[in-house]
Image (tube, rainbow, N blue to C red):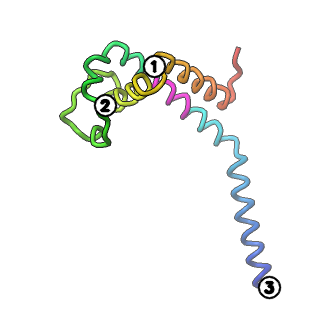
Amino acid sequence: MANRRKLKDKKSSRLDSIKESVTDKRIPKVLGVLVLLLSLYLFVAFLSYLFTWKTDQDQVFNFSWSLFFDRSIQVENLLGRFGAIASNAFFYWGIGLASFISVFILFKFGFFTVGWKGP
């Protein structure tokens, strides 16, 4: 009987520590900052892709995971291979120029998750 109580107390203490870490106010702030950084990264990649798409699309059109590690691929995107691949995915395979809307939505989500008051 005592072993069951100890096990139950141990489980409840683990559950309490998980609840505390989930309700910690730092987690949404860190998540918000990461989303803000992602939106900034995508904005720069998309903006660069508008000017370099002709040369970058030839390099990343036939996507394979080996593109991330192939040093012989030369892209002109300001954010390198990953920026060119992400931009091509959004613009060519995705929703085109409206991809900037997704950047705006990510920015707003990160902005309000961090807790800054908007206009």
Please name the predominant secondary structure of the magenta segment in the image. Answer: helix
Quadrant housing residue 2 = bottom right
Label 1 vs 3, first from the N-terminus: 3
Q: Position of residue 76 (x, y in %)?
A: 27, 21
Q: CA distance from mark 1 to mark 2?
A: 19 Å
N-terminal of the pair, mark 1 or mark 2, is 2
Alpha carbon separation for disc pair 1 and 3: 64 Å
Read off the residue under disc 1.
Answer: 96
Q: Nearer the viewer, residue 59 or 17?
A: 59
Q: Residues within 10 Å of mark 1 (few under 14, many from 20)?
A: few
Disc 1 is placed on an element classified as helix
Left or right, residue 104 beside residue 57: right
Assess disc 2: are there few (<14), some (14-19) or many (≥20) residues with their C-alpha within 10 Å of its C-alpha: many
Asked if residue 7 lies in the magenta stretch, the reply is no
| Label of residue 114 in the image | none
- Say which residue appears at 42% left-offset and 20% top-offset: 46
Residues rendered magenta in the picture: 34-42
